[in-house]
Image (cartoon, grey):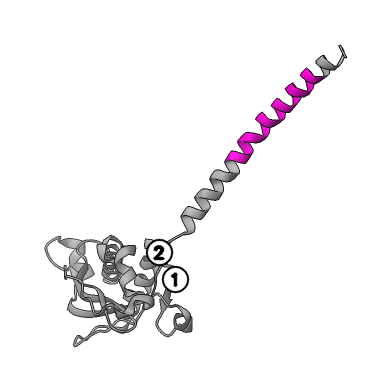
């Protein structure tokens, strides 16, 4: 009987150590499970955007300018990280995406410049582009309507204006409060019966 007490004491110590080592792991697992559950519940869907080809409007805008604006715009929109997918016009993938916005851009003003003049003076020769960009749902509800400018005043080719323009359009979209998750939720196909909404201009 006397030898059982040391054995019992050793058993209690070993059991206590085992519990102490196992407890942090159990708590970590429970915490991770809670965070995972909380993070997945009620998460707003990330919208995608399909970019339509540039509309020159009533202006005689060279095809190279239209293509340059379009390609730069696709690239700059991808850089914003605002959208799950940035699709070209005609991409059939858009047919299977429920939360899809459409970006339409029309050129409303174009002032051709001169690279030669820009090289010798800072007061003339600037190339300027002004467009109206509308971000819409596929059923025509306007989410964002803005007028954006792009130009090249100093060094650089005329096509540099198209890059600056695309960057400015993407910047306006990225910073717009109209694209916050809680506002976009009203345009989701699930909530499509809430009526038409037009965002304020800039």
Q: Quadrant for the N terminus, please.
A: top right
Relative horizontal placement of residue 8, taking residue 193 as reference (left or right): right
Q: Residue at x 22, y 76 (%)?
A: 197
Residue 11 falls inside the magenta stretch: yes
Q: CA distance from mark 1 to mark 2?
A: 15 Å
Residue lying at 42% horizontally and 67% vertically, measured from the top left: 45
- Vertical placement of 10 versus 31: above or below? above
Magenta region, mostly helix, strand or loop?
helix
For residue 64, above or below residue 171: below
Q: What segment is highlighted magenta in the picture? A: 8-27
Nearest the viewer among 171 and 125 is 171
> Image quadrant of residue 138?
bottom left
**Residue 70, percent across and down?**
34, 76
Task: Give neighbour class at mark 1: few <14, some 14-19, many 20+ (Cα, 10 Å).
Answer: some
x, y percent for residue 34: 52, 49
Residue, x 36% and y 67% (percent of image)? 77
Check disc 2: other Cα within 10 Å, few if <14, some if 14-19, many if 20+.
few
Residue 188 highlighted magenta (yes or no): no
- Residue at label 1? 85
Q: Find residue 130 and report its image quarter.
A: bottom left
N-terminal label among 1 and 2: 2
The answer to whether residue 65 is left or right of residue 60 is right
Q: Position of residue 67 (x, y in %)?
A: 35, 79
Q: What element does badge 2 sit on?
A: loop
In this view, the residue in front, 88 or 1, is: 1
Nearest the camera: 179 or 67? 179
* Residue denoted by label 2: 44
């Amino acid at each position: 009987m006397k030898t059982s007490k040391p054995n019992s004491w050793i058993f209690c110590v070993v059991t206590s150590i085992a519990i102490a080592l196992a407890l942090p792991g159990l708590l970590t697992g429970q915490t991770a499970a809670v965070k995972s559950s909380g993070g997945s519940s009620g998460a707003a869907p990330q919208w995608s955007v399909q970019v339509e080809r540039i509309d020159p409007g009533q202006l005689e805008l060279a095809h190279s300018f239209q293509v340059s604006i379009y390609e730069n715009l696709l690239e700059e929109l991808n850089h914003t990280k605002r959208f799950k997918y940035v699709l070209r016009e005609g991409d059939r993938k858009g047919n299977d995406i429920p939360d899809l916005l459409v970006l339409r851009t029309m050129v409303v003003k174009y002032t051709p410049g001169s690279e030669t003049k820009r090289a010798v003076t800072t007061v003339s020769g600037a190339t300027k582009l002004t467009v109206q960009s509308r971000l819409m749902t596929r059923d025509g509800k306007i989410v964002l309507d803005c007028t954006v400018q792009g130009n090249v005043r100093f060094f650089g080719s005329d096509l540099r204006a198209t890059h600056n323009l695309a960057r400015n359009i993407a910047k306006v979209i990225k910073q717009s409060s109209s694209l916050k998750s809680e506002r976009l939720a009203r345009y989701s196909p699930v909530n499509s019966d809430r009526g038409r909404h037009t965002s304020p201009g800039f």
